[in-house]
């Protein structure tokens, strides 16, 4: 069973020879950048550099998957938000959200023309030639609520939850159209799995999630044909059932989640991915990393992976301690 077969079967909750050592969240670290010569910010902006670094994370880092891009601001930049890039290998780009009064300036981007979207699509196509039928290729994009949060001032969002819900619903319809267009363009470039990233929905609580995030995420999932992994950062205990109801193939969960509870409430409808703490991978010693990894393996995670994106300062030896534990468990 090769790496691609192993991950795809695990996501479908089918029997595998051993767990996959794949990382669907952000997987680039500075040590790999230094050894490969592919670095941020160039690898965040240019297809050739992006593909080179993603492949290096597999080849040098030992990760049994390849994942692009490396930040969650691709769509925001293409929609017209000002984006600031860091000047070193450990600083992610940041987009400046618009105020509510300026939000009519948001545009519906063309994935093949606007911002860095075409660079991501080209990077996927380049990587498809290298990964072939052996290594799983994962491409990430934002959920509609995540797109809203990266383009609209968050204070305006939280106030509008109660004061102007019709405004939010109108914008989320637009974000769903944008997310769907981009997701389908990504599918056309040929990845094996789509990672749907939502960094913020856990902050609004289950009732608001049910109204302002869940139905739009579900619509996005239903528009896609490839396997999907839905990631919501932080403690998602109160929304796990709704996350599973979106129809996503798998849920990526963070360290606070009780896996026995997650398995119970999702009722075998979805695979579970996670839940190693990125902080443990960043700062823990080998014993702590091995212990946390073995815990997730024993709990029955279908894919044992970081519960959120790798911090770029994570030492390569720490990353490999986790990967070796998965492979040899």
Image (cartoon, helix red, strand yellow):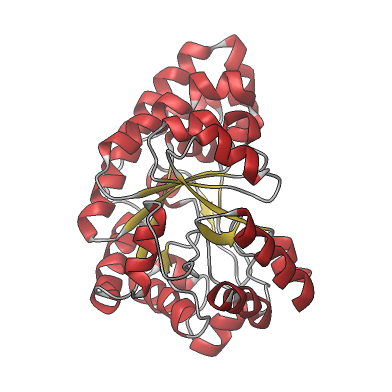
Residue 309: quadrant of the picture: bottom right
Left or right of 172: which side holds 320? right
Residue drawn 50% across the image and 22% down it: 212
- Above or below residue 244? Residue 81 is below
Residue drawn 46% across the image and 35% down it: 244
Q: Position of residue 315 (x, y in %)?
A: 68, 78
Q: Position of residue 15 (x, y in %)?
A: 39, 60
Residue 178: quadrant of the picture: top left
Of the pair 203 and 286, the residue shown nearer to us? 286
Of the pair 230 and 249, the residue shown nearer to us? 249
Q: Position of residue 84 (x, y in %)?
A: 55, 56
Q: Residue furthest bottom?
A: 35
Q: Does the rendering let one see residue 152? A: no
On the rendered image, what quadrant is the C terminus found in?
A: bottom right
On the rendered image, what quadrant is the N terminus found in?
A: bottom left
Residue drawn 36% across the image and 24% down it: 173
- Above or below residue 257? Residue 279 is below
Q: Position of residue 148 (x, y in %)?
A: 48, 33
Instruction: Count all numbered tags in the image, as a single digit.
Output: 0
- Above or below residue 297? Residue 229 is above
Q: Does the rendering let one see residue 326? A: yes
Residue drawn 46% across the image and 68% down it: 20
- Above or below residue 191? Residue 250 is above
Q: Residue furthest left?
A: 188
């Amino acid at each position: 069973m090769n790496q691609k077969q192993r991950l795809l079967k695990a996501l479908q909750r089918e029997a595998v020879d051993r767990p996959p050592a794949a990382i669907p969240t952000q997987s680039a670290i500075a040590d790999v950048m230094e050894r490969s010569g592919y670095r941020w910010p160039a690898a965040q902006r240019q297809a050739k550099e992006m593909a080179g670094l993603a492949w290096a994370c597999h080849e040098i880092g030992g990760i049994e998957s390849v994942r692009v891009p490396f930040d969650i601001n691709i769509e925001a930049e293409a929609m017209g938000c000002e984006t600031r890039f860091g000047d070193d290998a450990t600083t992610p780009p940041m987009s400046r959200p618009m105020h509510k009064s300026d939000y009519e300036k948001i545009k519906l981007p063309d994935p093949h023309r606007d911002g860095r979207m075409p660079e991501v699509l080209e990077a996927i196509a380049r990587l498809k030639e290298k990964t072939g039928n052996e290594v799983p290729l994962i491409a990430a994009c934002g959920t509609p609520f995540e797109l809203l949060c990266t383009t609209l001032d968050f204070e305006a969002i939280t106030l509008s939850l109660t004061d102007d819900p019709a405004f939010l619903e109108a914008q989320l319809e637009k974000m769903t159209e944008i997310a769907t267009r981009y997701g389908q363009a990504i599918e056309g470039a040929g990845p094996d799995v789509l990672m749907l990233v939502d960094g913020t929905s856990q902050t609004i609580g289950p009732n608001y999630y049910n109204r302002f995030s869940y139905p739009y995420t579900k619509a996005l999932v239903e528009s896609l044909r490839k396997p999907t992994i839905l990631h919501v950062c932080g403690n998602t205990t109160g929304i796990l059932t709704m996350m599973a109801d979106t129809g996503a193939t798998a849920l990526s969960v963070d360290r606070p989640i009780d896996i026995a509870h997650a398995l119970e409430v999702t009722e075998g409808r979805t695979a579970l991915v996670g839940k190693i703490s990125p902080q443990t991978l960043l700062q823990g010693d080998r014993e702590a990393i091995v212990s946390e990894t073995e815990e997730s393996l024993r709990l029955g995670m279908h894919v044992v992976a970081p519960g959120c994106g790798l911090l770029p300062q994570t030492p390569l030896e720490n990353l490999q301690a986790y990967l070796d534990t998965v492979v040899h468990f």
